[in-house]
């Protein structure tokens, strides 16, 4: 197995600094004649950065942030609104709903505020005692409980959530907060207007969106909806909801709404699912939909069309892989939430898992493609926060929790996220995750949306490591050593999210992958390539290859590497970059390739161990970490896959 290629992190920066520091040197004034350049670099500009069309920057953002406009966020104390969320994401300091000053270490490049479409803005008016709401018995009861505060307020919040989730909320009271109501239209207009106000192409991009929150008996089928368009098109509609009689919990009805939007406005829109790990086996069906209708060709076509990405990691657990599904993957058990469905109304059983996790869905997509001709689960992977605080925080040392009631404080580790007779999602198990990296030509709505549609995206659990992943048939070490691997990557193959071009001959595919650590983060442990293939019997298989790694470790006969080590200092909430590498890269050839078997490949990049957020809480508040809480972990990135299909 080939050793990785390691490069000095600051070499290019030092060379650039030297040139900039001497702008008046004699050689800088030399101007060659036009004739002397006439036969140089025929067919391309001398500058390798001129006249190129491929994306050269990764832009960081969050596809999934809630403000106080979301009913659940408001119920649990969120008072920050649209303006606060945008200002915070672009780098401003704000005061959180719990009264604490907070700021990101680095601004984000783009943001999607995805407030829940059902009842959007309802809580704000309820808390303000709007007469049109408190004239109803339900509204009056909840308002009085909220005003009383303390336990009465908590009881009112839980009662409202339960009443809404069971479909027992007064429809007359909710009519103005549903499609068709003037209030609902005005609230959506404020959402659109705020996005327009803060959209600053080239510097900070706002993508208009909302969350369609389908919940089938507590089983999560949530999707975020993202628009490519601005107010001129997104403002022509109001969000699709789940409550009858206008809304629906069926994803096929959401797809119909998306289709209608594009036909009506000429715009573009996509959907993004998340938290399949809390769906209790219905997020990625293989035989029948949650409605009981059989999977068919139309279902596979529509899902493939409208859902090009999946949110693979976020606050409510990591959804890449599960140890029971991938027993040979030593890193599959990461931030795993597998107790039950979203509200713990039903316990999890092992047979549900195969329809919940991204890797297994990608596997099942190969099977469904053989049967129906279309792969419904041919998605790219991103991370996002699902924060309900208006604060898009994913750093362990700066984590402001899922909701305002668990923003930083001495007791938040002990506060369960959810609890029932079926089990508990412990407060200390909340995940400080994640962000989406998008390889785009520029920081604009159109460029970012287009990158999402072509799946040239990847997700991380929070760190902003730079990762590129290409697949082709003849990459070489020289392509990597050129220090311009992206040029070779696009010239000779496809980036993450693509399909391998047709092979010429019987050669195996080659993959070029490289990763640069987050400049203010931890060193890298290793790069792995996850391969999944389907055999002639229709059975799927997987294998995880270590392809590049740090330090002087040697793999054993099975390709397994010794652990990178652990420098975490729990007492002081710290770690040191005395192990690992700042950069890893390699060209890898699949040693087990069979040209007759459909397959996909994606890269997983792991950092060295670092402290989880509970360790920072323990240090700053002087409290003990609850028994059973994980104190360190290896943060990671997941690229979108590259697919291979046998030639007819």
Image: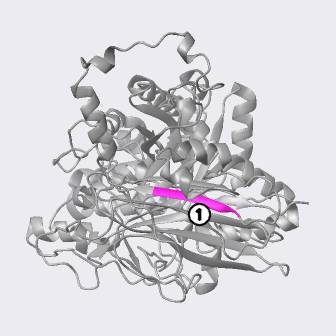
Q: How is the image coloured?
A: one colour
- Image position, residue 351 (x, y; %): 64, 84
User: Image quadrant for the C terminus?
Assistant: bottom right
User: Is 122 one of the magenta-colored residues?
Assistant: no
Q: Is residue 393 above or below residue 196?
A: below
Q: Which residue is mark 1?
A: 602
- Image position, residue 522 (x, y; %): 29, 62
- Image position, residue 146 (x, y; %): 28, 53
Residue 601 visible within the image:
yes
- What secondary structure is the magenta-colored segment mainly? strand
Quarter of the figure with residue 201 = top left
Residue at the far left in the pictured view: 622
The residue at 16%/62% (across/down) is 409
Residue at the far bottom in the pictured view: 557
Quarter of the figure with residue 141 = bottom left
In this rendered view, identify the residue nearer to me: 171 or 21.
Answer: 21
Taking the image as shown, residue 420 lies to the left or right of residue 380, namely left
- Image position, residue 15 (x, y; %): 30, 38
Taking the image as shown, residue 269 lies to the left or right of residue 327, namely right
The residue at 70%/41% (across/down) is 257
Quarter of the figure with residue 647 = bottom right
In this rendered view, identify the residue nearer to me: 288 or 500.
Answer: 500
The residue at 38%/28% (across/down) is 203
In this rendered view, identify the residue nearer to me: 172 or 165.
Answer: 165
Which class describes the residues within 10 Å of circle 1: few (<14), some (14-19), or many (20+)?
Answer: many
Q: Is residue 385 above or below residue 526?
A: above
User: Magenta segment, which residues?
Assistant: 509-514
């Amino acid at each position: 197995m080939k050793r990785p290629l390691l490069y000095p992190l600051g070499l290019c920066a030092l060379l650039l600094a030297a040139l900039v520091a001497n702008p008046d040197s004699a050689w800088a004034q030399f101007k060659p004649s036009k004739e002397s350049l006439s036969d140089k670099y025929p067919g391309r500009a001398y500058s390798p950065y001129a006249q190129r069309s491929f994306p050269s920057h990764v832009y960081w953002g969050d596809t999934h942030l809630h403000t106080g406009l979301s009913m659940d966020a408001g119920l649990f104390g969120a008072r920050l609104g649209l303006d606060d969320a945008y200002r915070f994401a672009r780098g401003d300091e704000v005061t959180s709903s719990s009264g604490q000053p907070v700021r990101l270490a680095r601004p984000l490049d783009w943001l999607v505020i995805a407030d829940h479409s059902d009842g959007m803005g309802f809580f704000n008016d309820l808390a303000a005692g709007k007469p049109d709401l408190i004239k109803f018995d339900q509204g009056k009861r909840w308002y009085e409980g909220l005003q009383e505060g303390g336990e009465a307020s908590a009881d009112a919040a839980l009662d409202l959530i339960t009443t809404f989730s069971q479909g027992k909320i007064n429809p007359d009271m909710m009519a103005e907060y549903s499609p068709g109501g003037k209030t609902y239209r005005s609230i959506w207009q404020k959402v659109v207007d705020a996005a327009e106000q803060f959209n600053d192409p080239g510097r900070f991009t706002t993508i208009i969106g909302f969350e369609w929150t389908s919940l089938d008996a507590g089983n999560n089928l949530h999707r975020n909806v993202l628009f490519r368009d601005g107010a001129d098109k997104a403002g022509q509609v109001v969000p699709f909801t789940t409550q009858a009689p206008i809304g629906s919990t069926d994803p096929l009805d959401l797809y119909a709404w998306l289709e209608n939007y594009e036909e009506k406005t000429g715009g573009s829109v996509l959907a993004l699912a998340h938290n399949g790990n809390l769906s209790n086996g219905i997020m990625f069906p293989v035989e029948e939909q949650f409605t009981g209708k059989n999977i068919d060709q139309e279902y596979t076509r529509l899902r493939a069309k409208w859902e090009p990405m999946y949110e693979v990691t976020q606050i409510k657990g990591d959804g890449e892989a599960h140890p029971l599904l991938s027993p040979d993957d030593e890193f599959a058990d990461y931030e795993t939430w597998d107790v039950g469905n979203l509200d713990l109304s039903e316990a999890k059983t092992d047979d549900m898992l195969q329809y919940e996790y991204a890797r297994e869905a990608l596997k099942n997509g190969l099977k469904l493609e053989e049967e129906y001709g279309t792969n419904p689960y041919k998605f790219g992977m991103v991370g996002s926060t699902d924060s309900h605080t208006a604060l898009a925080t994913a750093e362990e040392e700066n984590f402001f929790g899922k909701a305002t009631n668990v923003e930083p404080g001495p007791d938040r580790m002990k506060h369960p996220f959810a609890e029932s007779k079926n089990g508990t999602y412990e407060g200390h198990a909340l995940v400080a995750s994640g962000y989406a990296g998008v390889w785009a030509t520029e920081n604009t709505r159109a460029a970012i949306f287009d990158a999402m549609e072509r799946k040239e995206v990847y997700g991380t659990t929070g760190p902003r490591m730079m990762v590129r992943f290409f697949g082709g048939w003849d990459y070489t070490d020289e392509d990597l050593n050129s220090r311009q691997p992206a040029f070779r990557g696009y010239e000779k193959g496809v980036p993450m999210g693509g399909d391998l071009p047709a092979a010429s001959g019987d050669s195996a595919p080659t993959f070029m992958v490289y990763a640069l650590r987050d400049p203010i983060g931890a060193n890298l442990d290793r790069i792995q390539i996850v391969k999944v293939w389907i055999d002639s019997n229709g059975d799927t298989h997987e294998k995880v290859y270590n392809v590049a790694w740090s330090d002087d470790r040697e793999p054993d006969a099975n390709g397994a590497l010794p652990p990178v080590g652990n420098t975490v200092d729990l007492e002081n909430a710290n770690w040191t970059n005395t192990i690992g590498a700042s950069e890893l890269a390699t060209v890898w050839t699949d040693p087990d390739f069979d040209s007759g078997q459909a397959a996909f490949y994606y890269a997983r990049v792991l950092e060295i161990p670092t402290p989880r957020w509970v360790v920072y809480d323990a240090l700053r508040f002087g409290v003990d970490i609850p028994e059973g809480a994980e104190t360190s972990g290896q943060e990671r990135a997941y690229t979108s896959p590259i697919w291979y299909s046998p030639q007819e």
